[in-house]
Image: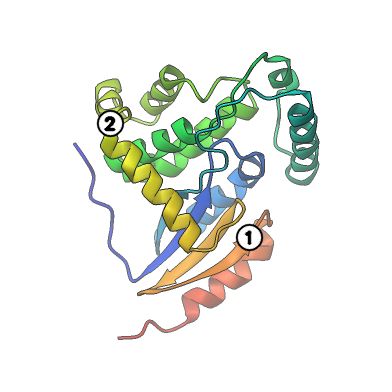
Amino acid sequence: MNETPAQNDREIIYVADPMCSWCWGFAPVIKTITETYGSQVDITPIMGGLRPLTRHPMDSDAKQSMRSHWDHVQERSGQPFDYAFFDREAFIYDTEPACRAVVTVRSVKPSAALDYLERVHEAQYAHNRDTTDATVLAELAESVGVTRSDFDGIFPTRAAIYQTSGDFHTAYRLGATGFPTVAVRTGQNVRTISAGYQAFDDLKPTIDAWLAEPVAA
């Protein structure tokens, strides 16, 4: 059974990709944001589409570049990484299935979407699991309370593909050219408050000031 998300005049919009290393680095930050502000405002994950529909396997140059990113993320955030990922042969880094999986979970159980996003991050980066694999994605969905039948009934459909594309378009309209991006909505007005990794203590004053602003009638 689908949940109906809460309605609110304010919303925190989190634009991310499940296979974005900086988003994995940001996972503890968005978790703290959720724990701190989730009872006051809706916090909605939107999938940005880091490398959707990639068709060519990673070559050695791509692996070297990505390894450098991982080093920076680990140094900045302290998040764990399993570098055995780079031993994979002919891996195609297509982020669309993982994005669609988050959209699927969000459509079935909105309250689990952020938790699911973190679990996909963790599977990808800390445990070297293949998060382009629908079976892995379905198993992770079960871990947040979405049944295999509910997940499998939505994930492969044209509707889910269309909705995921809609997320990519929303991210584009928000001006999210990189991930993670955090935006805030008051009524119909949306503005970006963070583009790229920031610590919670750096974001908190901005969020507090936003919440202190009056909501126009």
Furthest residue in direction front, as rendered:
56
- Quadrant of res 63: top right
| Direction from residue 64 to residue 44 in the image, left or right | left
Q: Is residue 123 above or below residue 12?
A: above
Image quarter in which the C terminus is found: bottom left
Asked whether the residues under the numbered discs 1 and 2 touch, taking CB atoms below 8 Å apart as contact, a structural biologist would say no
- Residue 128 vertical position relative to residue 64 in the rendered view, above or below: above
The quadrant where residue 40 appears: bottom left
Classify mark 2: residues with Cα within 10 Å, few (<14), some (14-19) or many (20+).
Answer: few
- 193 relative position to 41: left or right: right
Ranked by sequence position, the earlier of labels 1 and 2 is 2
Please tell me which residue is depicted at 40% across the width and 63% down the height of the picture. Answer: 41
For the N terminus, the image quarter is: top left
Secondary structure, mark 2, is loop
Give whichever of 97, 72 is nearer the camera. Answer: 97
Does the image show residue 45?
no
Q: Position of residue 26 (x, y in %)?
A: 63, 47
Q: Is residue 42 left or right of residue 70?
A: left
Q: Which residue is mark 1?
A: 195
Given the image, on which type of amino acid does mark 2 rest? Answer: Thr
- Amino acid residing under circle 1: Ala
Marker disc for residue 157: 2
Q: Residue at x 60, y 25 (%)?
A: 56
Which callout, 1 or 2, points to the residue nearer the camera?
2
Tell me the residue at 72%/17% (across/down).
84
Q: Position of residue 30 (x, y in %)?
A: 55, 51
Q: Residues within 10 Å of mark 1 (few under 14, many from 20)?
A: some
Q: Look at the numbered disc 1 and give the secondary structure of its residue.
A: strand
Please tell me the numbered disc located at residue 176. none
Residue 47 image point, x, y percent: 47, 46
Which residue is found at the position 56% from the left and 26% from the top?
123
